[in-house]
Image (cartoon, helix red, strand yellow):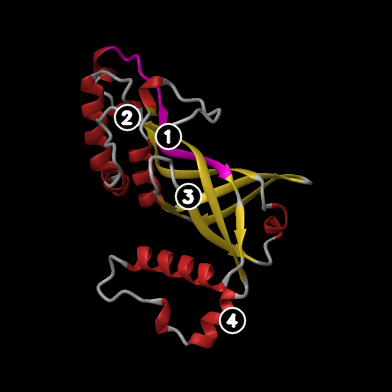
Amino acid sequence: MTSSGLYNPAAFRVEDDEPLARAIDEIVFGTLLTNGPDGPRASHLPLLLARHGDGPGTLRGHLARANPHVQSLAGEPALVIFQGPAHYVTPSWYASKAQTGKVVPTWNYVVVHARGTVRLEQEPEFLRSVVESLTDRMEASRPEPWRVDDAPAEFTDALLRQIVGIEIPLSSLEGKFKLGQNRPAADRESLAAGLEAELPDVWRALGRLPAGPNEPA
């Protein structure tokens, strides 16, 4: 983990690349940011992280060939933001509200920042591999997963010609899991109970990540 400029107090900081890689695997959808000739540019896309050796790995995905962002991507340093579960925290969820009243609202969230330099890939084999990998990842939980080969070959081949592959060998990962770790134990417990009762979808999403709402990140 190398600092990328993210405001990241020690209580919320995730130091190890492994839980950050697992978070990216769960979130999948990222925001790709670069500086173009006319200022900052952003594209939103699913990306898969390939791990290799001891490094943070390589992100792989694709963009529409018609996307103007593609024209200024090759060789550019990039920041990819993976935004995980996020939710408003009411003071009513804190046990200390009844004890001292010294509580205020906040916002809890999970975010991973990935940095690297963009490479564009045009080879049909790469493009098909990326599309198949993304499809298999997202279809894996379905009772009868759809596969790229289920569509007519001439149809998918035509669509592959309309995309450009991207690879981003990563130089760093940085994560911030702001989940109430700086609160007293009683507040963390009551926060978890309030979240489970009132926002069960968020609660379940947090449970799929490598750090839960009461675990130090």
Q: Residue at x 72, y 53 (%)?
A: 72
Whether pointer 4 and pointer 2 mark residues with C-beta atoms closer than 8 Å, the reply is no
- Helix, strand or loop at label 2? It is loop
Identity, as a three-letter code, of the amino acid under mark 2: Ala
Whether pointer 2 and pointer 1 mark residues with C-beta atoms closer than 8 Å, the reply is yes
Q: Which mark is residue 58?
A: 3
Magenta region: which residues? 100-116
Give coordinates of residue 126: x percent, y percent.
Answer: 52, 67
Q: Which mark is residue 69?
A: none
Foreground of the two, 117 or 131: 117
Quadrant the C terminus occupies: top left
Q: Is residue 4 above or below residue 74?
A: above
Q: Nearer the viewer, mark 4 or mark 2?
A: 4
Judge the density around disc 3: few (<14), some (14-19), many (≥20) Cα neighbours within 10 Å.
Answer: many
Give coordinates of residue 14: x percent, y percent.
Answer: 37, 30
Q: Which residue is mark 2?
A: 217
